[in-house]
Amino acid sequence: MNHLCESANGLGLVSRRALHNGDVDIQARALIYENWDQRYDQLSGGRFDGSMQEIRFPSFTLIRETSNRVLLQKGCTPQGVFAIGTLLTLGESGYHCGELMATRTAALLEPGTEFEIRTPERFDLVAAVFSPRDLTTNLDGPVLDYEELEADLRRSSKTIGPANAGPMADFLQRVHACAQDTPDYLMLPSNLHQLEEEFYSLLIETLRLARGPEVHALCPNRERIVRRFRALLDASPESALSIVDICDEIGVTRRTLQNATQEVFGISPQHYLKAIRLNAFRRALKVREPQRESIGDVAARWGFWHLSQLAQDYRKLFGELPSQTPCIHVS
């Protein structure tokens, strides 16, 4: 089930939107701040359950996203928009653009930049999305140069370890908790001003601390292999590629591909390939016209020749049979 809740307070200064999602593709489209052009592929099995909350303040938007399955998130940040977010999940690591993300590690995204994130099984992310121009314009006191702030953001490490990102993580978590428990406190203009001042100060301090490397990077060669693997699948989405085909195309051995996907995604190449094809098959099922195309027709188009095995694999990954996936024409 998907549930939407929206509210606005404080003469329009603060608005809140919350969406609970039972569908991974709806989760990918749930972020309405600008246009993120996201695609989520589910990699671990079971019914999906997630949520997306947006709390808009004059200077930045707070986002809280949760999900209960390992996802490969791919997208592109909107022009003019930066985002800084931190994992709140305990005991699991994720992957962000070539680097590992542990609990309370922060990821910094630049405008107009493609990103790829592999989430942990229990994903809980809190983030601030903002325009440097809007942020500096809303702050009082001496004139702030938004171009200088933007330059600092672009020079910063894109993954910031827990020791340096901790204060920012604590702040974002406090803001979210306050918005849930005592929202009226945030409506006061004086409190909003203090909130924005604290965010700006923490952002500057986090960027200063992040100038030195602190996080563990993945093996660059393995990360490049996985990117080529993903690009090959994206370039030929309906091709029934085998692992041998992929190894030949990329120019690596099966063991090298195994080691690369295991390090980056935590699963085997076969599991990854099957999961990507099943996700694509599921999206095709949603937009098919039942009168013109049967489930078997869609399966054949995506290279699934054994319908019984397909049904088993599909239910294992998504917690439902192909026949239980509704047709939803996505605009």
Image (cartoon, grey):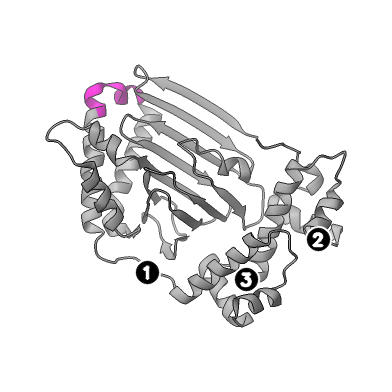
Rendered-image quadrant of the C terminus = top right
Give the residue at x 44% y 28%.
16
Q: Which residue is mark 1?
A: 216
Q: Which residue is mark 2?
A: 304
> Seen in the image, is 285 located left or right of residue 76?
right
Asked where in the image residue 286 lies, by quadrant, the reply is top right
- For numbered disc 3, what is the local secondary structure? loop
Q: Which residues are magenta?
A: 183-192
- For numbered disc 2, what is the local secondary structure? loop
- For numbered disc 1, what is the local secondary structure? loop
Amino acid type indicated by mark 3:
Ser
Q: Which residue is mark 3?
A: 268
Residue 60 visible to an observer of this rendering: yes
Which of the two labelled residues, at mark 3 and mark 2, occupies the earlier sequence position?
A: 3
> Seen in the image, is 169 located left or right of residue 145?
right
Give the residue at x 86% y 58%.
308
Q: Main secondary structure of the magenta part?
A: helix
Residue 296's place in the image compared with 187, above or below, is: below
Label count reads 3
Give the residue at x 67% y 65%.
273
Q: Position of residue 184 (x, y in %)?
A: 33, 21
Q: Relative to the observer, which residue lies in front, 63 or 229?
A: 229
Q: Relative to the observer, which residue lies in front, 180 or 168?
A: 168
Residue at mark 2 to residue at mark 1: CA–CA distance: 39 Å
Residue 106's place in the image compared with 249, above or below, is: above
